[in-house]
């Protein structure tokens, strides 16, 4: 195993998945890619598109900036906690599942680690991003117990 990808969205569940991915990377000598995907569509942040104005765009920008700061801090913490693991942090934009899958494809990843965060809807076990990653992944998918 040479490359592991994990998504990080600032949640406790994502942090647990990142820790699991780092443990796997340490055990296999793999490089760990921690991806944070910023959704740049104001509608996805709960804003009515008809009401999107400068304030809404500023709020999305502030949220994105905060998420980027947390992602950098998490990558730094993982580097400190797993000294033998090469951690590569990337900030992407767009649909989280699509960005994770496309990044995994582009680096020829061996495995994508996702969490099993419980959500309402079609699946009570995995979140929608995890389901989409499972469906479209170009490699193996490891489901970390995060709940």
Image (cartoon, grey):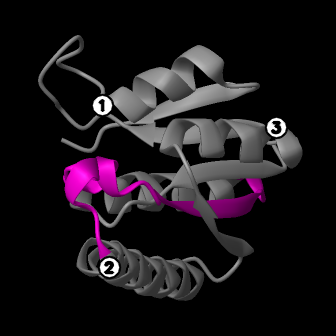
Q: Which mark sits nearer the N-terminus, 1 or 3?
A: 3
Give how far apart the Cα atoms at labels 1 and 3 are: 21 Å
| Relative horizontal placement of residue 23, taking residue 33 as reference (left or right) | left
The answer to whether residue 45 is above or below residue 88 is above
Quadrant of res 127:
top left
Residue reaching furthest to the front: 50
> Does the rendering let one see residue 16?
yes
Q: Residue at x 30, y 26 (%)?
A: 126
Q: Which residue is mark 2?
A: 54
Q: Which residue is mark 3?
A: 105
Query: Considering depth in this image, is 147 or 38 the residue closer to the camera?
Result: 38
Q: Which residues are magenta?
A: 28-53
In the rendering, at what x and y percent does residue 56 appear? 26, 72
Q: Which residue is mark 1?
A: 127
Q: Between tags 3 and 2, which lies in front?
A: 2
| Relative horizontal placement of residue 26, taking residue 52 as reference (left or right) | right
Q: Residue at x 52, y 43 (%)?
A: 95
Look at the image and say whether residue 32 sits in the magenta stretch: yes
In the rendering, at what x and y percent does residue 87 appear? 68, 73
In the rendering, at what x and y percent does residue 130 appear? 43, 30
Quarter placement of the C terminus = top left
Look at the image and say whether residue 136 sits in the magenta stretch: no
| Relative horizontal placement of residue 146, taking residue 61 as reference (left or right) | left
Q: Residue at x 81, y 43 (%)?
A: 1
User: Contact (CB < 8 A) between labels 1 and 3?
Assistant: no
């Amino acid at each position: 195993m040479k490359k592991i990808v994990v998504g990080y969205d600032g949640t406790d569940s994502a942090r647990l998945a990142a820790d699991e991915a780092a443990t796997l990377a340490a055990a296999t000598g793999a490089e760990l890619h921690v991806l944070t995907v910023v959704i740049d569509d104001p509608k996805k942040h709960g804003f009515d598109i008809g009401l999107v104005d400068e304030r809404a765009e500023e709020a999305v920008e502030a949220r994105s900036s905060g998420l980027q700061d947390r992602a950098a801090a998490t990558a730094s913490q993982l580097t400190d906690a797993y000294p033998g693991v090469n951690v590569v942090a990337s900030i992407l934009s767009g649909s989280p599942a699509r960005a994770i899958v496309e990044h995994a494809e582009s680096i020829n990843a061996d495995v994508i680690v996702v969490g099993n965060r419980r959500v309402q809807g079609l699946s009570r076990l995995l979140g929608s991003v995890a389901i989409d990653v499972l469906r479209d992944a170009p490699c193996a998918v490891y489901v970390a117990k995060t709940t």
